[in-house]
Amino acid sequence: MYRKTLFLFGILLIIGPGLVQAQQLRIGFMNPQEVLDSLPATAAVQKKLNDYLQQKQIDYQQKVKDYQKQITDYQNKKATLSQAEDQKEQAHLGQLSQQLQQYQQSAQSELQQKRQQLLGPILDDIQSAIKEVAQDMKLDFVVNKETQDGSQILMYTSESSKKNLDITQKVIDKLTQ
């Protein structure tokens, strides 16, 4: 979204002067994170994600505990193993270590997929509400008020624009009707 905004600003800088002379552009702005945070569905999604993450952490901790037990068992019987058995055990423990790393990476990937799956419909609804509000207000563009890390994109906004062109609350209202 940040790249899209920068791209939009670049386009506006290039073609903007000609367009502004031809017609008055109307640009609205909003804070999508504020919209997302205001929706009850977001809290439900966050709870589902937290529950999912907690279950993955429990599974991972159990796998780590099993791995550590096997290491302890190996260390206890190492002195009685033949060289071939020792190498076989070390190879097995190496495989278990790799499986733990793969599980952890897989769990992170699955969490991202789950987040996209659960948030996707909400984000689609937000996009539809933005479009409706923008059309109702006859806006040409709607830009994000700030980046995901909280950095502001809009360096200045007049008081009248804050009142008339910040569509954050209107989008929230549209979604909660």
Image (cartoon, grey):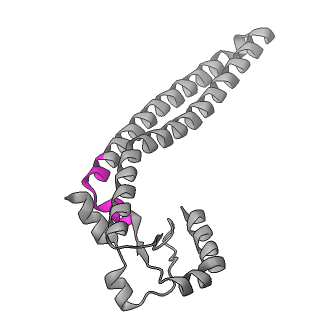
Q: Residue furthest right?
A: 83
Our reading of the magenta stretch's main secondary structure is: helix
93 left or right of 122? right
Residue 92: x %, y % from top left: 68, 18
Residue 64: x %, y % from top left: 53, 30
Q: Residue furthest left?
A: 177
68 left or right of 58? right
| Residue at 57% from the left image edge and 28% from the top image edge | 68
Q: Quadrant of residue 138?
A: bottom left
Residue 111: x %, y % from top left: 47, 40
Extent of the magenta region: 33-44
Inspect the magenta stretch and tell me whether residue 43 lies in it.
Answer: yes
| Residue at 56% from the left image edge and 87% from the top image edge | 21
Q: Which of these two is toward me, 49 or 176?
A: 176
Quarter of the image for the C terminus: give it.
Answer: bottom left
Inspect the magenta stretch and tell me whether residue 11 lies in it.
Answer: no
